[in-house]
Image (tube, grey):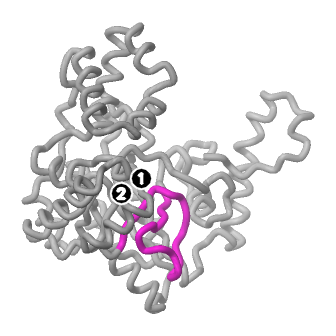
């Protein structure tokens, strides 16, 4: 993500000077805007939806091939503490209802967790409970039932092993890096993508799943729901929904919602599009399947006039919240969430 940085005089300075002064200026600007109140949340007519994926201890985060999609429990505690001080925290369904009914007394924020990873239950839930907060968890039902690693994680772990064991094959399969390969594979039909993933895993020497990886099972999901958290759908098998034919699309959307409801996880009104991918056909299918809200990975805040089937979110990352001294910064987080920082429009990074 691009930081807000004044361009005046940039070309007149040596590159090493610019690299040294940019973090200082960035932090100073963030602090100035924060202390002046310009980046502190005030609007009652906005709904901020933040996105988390994995919550991993530092040792596991170091092993994870996409660390930008993971936060440590300590970092999550910082983020939740910041949110508690400045927002009314609620689930997605309740937050949206409060927004459209114009009943907010504080700025509204909803925390969402994509994929239903077991670490969300093991490490995120205690942080939420210690802060007295609720969140919305999006579940891919077939993955939860089978404890199946999602395809992007399978590729990530296998690619890491392949780079160590067969560098030349890694270079052949990932000439522009893993992220670029994943973006390309997202557009493929499911059968082609699965065959490619299996080839990568086989070449890497078989499954490379670490012992700490796994999905939340339905018993633990029921415990989350009983504690007041909202359980939403993330489809059945986590496909790229616009690539599905009409029959497969409805099976993914209706099947996931029906399974979650059958497991006693509420009425399930919320949907998270896998990878954030959606189009008009997918949005219409989501409505027919009985959902009332759906979130994307497009960056932004929401108003009562936003399309409820294309709600925007703000991905939360450790690296973009650090000050130049290495500590998590409320001023930098406030700048990102304020909507004043250029470079945050468009799609956030999301493989889940």
**Helix, strand or loop under label 2:** loop
Where is residue 268 shown, x and y percent of the image?
22, 72
Instruction: Write down the quadrant of residue 33 in the picture.
Output: bottom right
Identify the residue at horizontal 25%, vertical 74% (top origin).
290
Q: Dot 2: few (<14), some (14–19), or many (≥20) neighbours within 10 Å?
A: many
Q: How many marks?
A: 2
Identify the residue at horizontal 74%, vertical 57% (top origin).
29
Identify the residue at horizontal 46%, vertical 84% (top origin).
99
**Helix, strand or loop under label 1:** loop
Instruction: Write down the quadrant of residue 67 in the picture.
Output: top left
Q: Which mark is residue 291?
A: none
Where is residue 255 shown, x and y percent of the image?
16, 61
Indicate yes or no whether the magenta region holds residue 15: no
- Between residue 12 and residue 157, name the one nearer to us: 157
Identify the residue at horizontal 42%, vertical 53% (top origin).
277
Residue 151 visible in image: yes
Residue that carries the numbered disc 1 in the rendered image: 277
Residues shaded magenta: 293-314
- The reply to whether the C-beta atoms of the residues labelled 1 and 2 are less than 8 Å apart is yes
């Amino acid at each position: 993500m691009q930081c807000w940085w004044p361009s005046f005089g940039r070309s007149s300075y040596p590159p090493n000077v610019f690299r040294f002064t940019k973090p200082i200026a960035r932090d100073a600007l963030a602090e100035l805007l924060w202390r002046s109140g310009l980046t502190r949340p005030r609007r009652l007519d906005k709904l901020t939806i933040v996105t988390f994926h994995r919550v991993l201890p530092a040792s596991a985060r170091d092993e994870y091939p996409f660390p930008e999609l993971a936060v440590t429990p300590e970092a999550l505690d910082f983020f939740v503490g910041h949110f508690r001080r400045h927002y009314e925290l609620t689930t997605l369904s309740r937050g949206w209802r409060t927004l459209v009914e114009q009943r907010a007394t504080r700025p509204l924020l909803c925390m969402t967790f994509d994929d239903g990873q077991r670490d969300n239950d093991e490490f995120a839930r205690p942080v939420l409970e210690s802060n007295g907060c609720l969140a919305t968890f999006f579940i891919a039902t077939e993955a939860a039932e089978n404890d199946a690693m999602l395809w992007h994680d399978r590729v990530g772990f296998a690619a890491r092993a392949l780079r160590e064991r067969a560098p030349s094959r890694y270079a052949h399969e990932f000439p522009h890096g893993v992220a670029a390969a994943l973006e390309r594979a997202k557009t493929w039909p499911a059968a082609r993508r699965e065959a490619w993933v299996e080839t990568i895993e086989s070449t890497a020497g078989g499954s490379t799943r670490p012992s700490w990886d796994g999905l939340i099972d339905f018993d633990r999901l029921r415990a989350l729901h009983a504690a007041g958290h909202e359980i939403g759908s993330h489809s059945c098998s986590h496909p790229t929904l616009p690539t599905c034919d009409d029959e497969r699309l409805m099976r993914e959307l209706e099947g996931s919602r029906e399974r979650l409801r059958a497991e006693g996880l509420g009425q399930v009104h919320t949907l998270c599009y896998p990878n954030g991918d959606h189009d008009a056909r997918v949005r219409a299918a989501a409505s027919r399947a009985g959902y009332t809200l759906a979130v994307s990975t497009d960056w932004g805040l929401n108003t009562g006039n936003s399309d409820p089937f294309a709600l925007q979110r703000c991905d939360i990352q450790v690296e973009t919240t650090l000050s130049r001294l290495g500590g998590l910064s409320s001023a930098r987080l406030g700048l990102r969430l304020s909507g004043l920082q250029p470079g945050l429009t468009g799609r956030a990074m999301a493989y889940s």
